[in-house]
Image (cartoon, grey):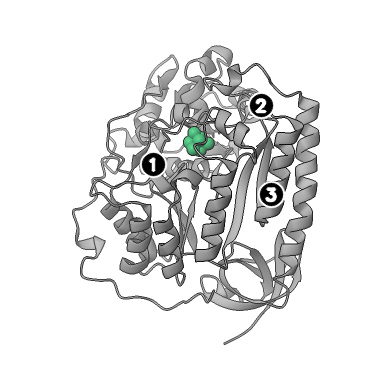
């Protein structure tokens, strides 16, 4: 695909001329003094959604006059924003809070809070198990953070605020301090799918979509700040549905046609909601919409997919992949896989390995199943022994490594369009990503950051590419 750096004209129905975004969070806090002279440090674990949420927390707390600091030692306020999709991060929260004990001995003003998915999941249990924690908030109460923290500094006991606003509209403009060249834009939150292994519907609530015009206006503002690439973010972006009846394909098309953004990506998709209309829009707007699709399959066995409540069979998934490949012939695919789901037999697992080989994903993100609170699968009786899960995971990675290296080798000699994201002073090289979402390293002047340039690939490694800049 040829990536264009040319800009399209914004049409007369530009989102900038629409109803202004309601921004209840951008008020002047009555407790603005609360952050004066205090540093804030946010420790983040988990997915891109969590990274994005942490950035939002920093932005909100800057409005309350806190100063972001690079280490917990310099902070008077520490927030742990952690994922709960797998078991380990929850344990990590407790151990991290434990390590902050010594900091409080030196700084009695220090307050420690836990937020994000772990906050929504564990609520006041966190404080019961670890009394060092001063406050807990959830994914739906991030925007109340300055108020919560004002309360924390003014009161004796812990503050817990993890309510879900199930019926409230989803109005969140992107809050990001230094967006750089490429940034994330939330379009949906929550999920209604209730896959039997997944805790997201319990930690992020019911699915909601941002108004169409709000997303477009948000993106226009990011462009003004120098952003060249956006990644639309949601647990299930494909079920986006705006208040005016626009679906995700309409949103992608709107962004491609009505804004000057150079590149558009999105994550994550659900196979059951990935329709032909979306494939067509991607094919028709390849000058802006990247050809990389992350389509989590989770298992290659229809029997396991059924017990996971995924809403598709192996055959239906493969049919969709064929359709995508026929409409977008240069598509690059990646996926998520869970091995050792309860009841997974050796034959089920081998079906997963065969599917990975048949689809030829460039990248897979594979994990061992771990039971999560509230989920149905945690109560399934036929749990797979840990040693079997470990062996299957290693086998799957081994099978995929062979495919991915062969696919990476095919890039050697090709000229890719790379959006330059950063320059390393230490190594004296540039780094950027191609439209295929490949990390490409090459030599060139520092002022190329932010430009899309042609790079000839000279050497492929399993997860990165090295190349030479071709001046035009
Ligand atoms: S689609 Fe399934 S796996 Fe994805 S967030 Fe929703 S419940 Fe979780």
On the image, the x and y values in percent for residue 107 come to 56, 27
Give the quarter of the figure containing the C terminus. bottom right
Alpha-carbon distance for marks 1 and 3?
Answer: 42 Å
Q: Earlier in the sequence, mark 3 or mark 2?
A: 2
Is 187 positioned to the left or the right of 217 in the image? right
* In front: label 1 or label 3: 3
On the image, the x and y values in percent for residue 259 come to 33, 67
Quarter occupied by residue 419: bottom right
Is 61 positioned to the left or the right of 73 in the image? left
Q: Secondary structure at mark 1?
A: helix
Alpha-carbon distance for marks 2 and 1?
Answer: 26 Å
Residue that extends furthest to the bottom in the rendered view of this protein: 472
Q: Secondary structure at mark 3?
A: helix
Tell me if I can see residue 112 in this picture.
no
On the image, the x and y values in percent for residue 34 come to 38, 33
Alpha-carbon distance for marks 3 and 2?
Answer: 41 Å
Residues at marks 3 and 2 touching, judged by CB atoms closer than 8 Å? no
Foreground residue among 196 and 71: 196
* In front: label 3 or label 2: 3
Foreground residue among 402 and 122: 402
Foreground residue among 345 and 115: 345
Mark number for residue 356? 3
Residue hosting label 2: 99
Quarter occupied by residue 325: bottom right
On the image, the x and y values in percent for residue 48 come to 53, 45
Give the quarter of the figure containing the N terminus. bottom right
Q: Residue at x 54, y 56 (%)?
A: 293
Mark number for residue 60? 1
């Amino acid at each position: 695909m040829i990536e264009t750096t040319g800009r399209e004209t914004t049409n007369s129905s530009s989102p900038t001329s629409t109803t202004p975004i309601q921004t209840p969070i951008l008020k002047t806090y009555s407790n603005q003094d609360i952050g004066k002279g205090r540093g804030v440090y946010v420790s983040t674990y988990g997915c891109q959604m969590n990274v994005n949420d942490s950035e939002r927390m920093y932005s909100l707390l800057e409005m309350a006059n806190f100063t972001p600091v690079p280490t917990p030692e310099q902070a008077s306020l520490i927030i742990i924003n952690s994922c709960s999709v797998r078991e380990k991060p929850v344990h990590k929260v407790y151990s991290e809070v434990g390590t902050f004990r010594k900091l409080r001995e030196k700084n009695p003003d220090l307050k420690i809070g836990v937020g994000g998915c772990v906050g929504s999941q564990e609520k006041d249990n966190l404080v019961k198990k670890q009394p060092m924690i001063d406050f807990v908030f959830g994914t739906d109460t991030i925007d109340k953070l300055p108020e919560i923290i004002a309360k924390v500094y003014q009161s004796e006991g812990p503050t817990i605020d993890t309510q879900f606003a199930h019926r409230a509209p989803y109005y969140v403009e992107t809050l990001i301090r230094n967006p750089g060249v490429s940034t994330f834009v939330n379009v949906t939150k929550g999920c209604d799918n209730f896959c039997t292994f997944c805790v997201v519907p319990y930690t992020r609530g019911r699915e909601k979509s941002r108004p169409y015009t709000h997303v477009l206006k948000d993106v226009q503002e990011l462009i003004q700040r120098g952003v060249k690439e956006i990644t639309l973010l949601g647990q299930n972006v494909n079920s986006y549905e705006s208040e005016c009846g626009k679906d995700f394909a309409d949103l992608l098309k709107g962004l491609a046609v009505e804004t000057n953004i150079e590149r558009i990506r999105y994550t994550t998709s659900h196979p059951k909601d990935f329709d032909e209309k979306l494939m067509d829009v991607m094919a028709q707007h390849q000058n802006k919409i990247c050809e990389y699709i992350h389509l989590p399959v989770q298992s290659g066995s229809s029997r396991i997919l059924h017990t996971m409540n995924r809403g598709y069979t192996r055959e239906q998934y493969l049919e969709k992949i064929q359709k995508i490949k026929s409409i977008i012939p240069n598509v690059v695919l990646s996926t998520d896989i869970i091995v050792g789901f309860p009841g997974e037999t050796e034959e089920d697992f081998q079906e997963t390995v065969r599917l990975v080989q048949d689809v030829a994903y460039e990248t897979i993100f594979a994990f061992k199943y771990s039971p999560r609170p509230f989920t149905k699968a945690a109560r399934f009786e036929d749990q797979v022994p840990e040693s079997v899960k470990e062996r299957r995971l290693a086998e799957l990675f081994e099978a995929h490594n062979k495919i991915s290296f062969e696919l990476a080798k095919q890039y050697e000699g090709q000229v890719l369009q790379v959006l330059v994201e950063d320059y390393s002073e230490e190594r004296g090289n540039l780094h950027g990503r191609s439209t295929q979402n490949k990390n490409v390293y090459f030599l060139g002047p520092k002022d190329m950051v932010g430009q899309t340039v042609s790079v000839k690939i000279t050497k492929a490694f399993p997860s990165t590419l090295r190349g030479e800049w071709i001046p035009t």
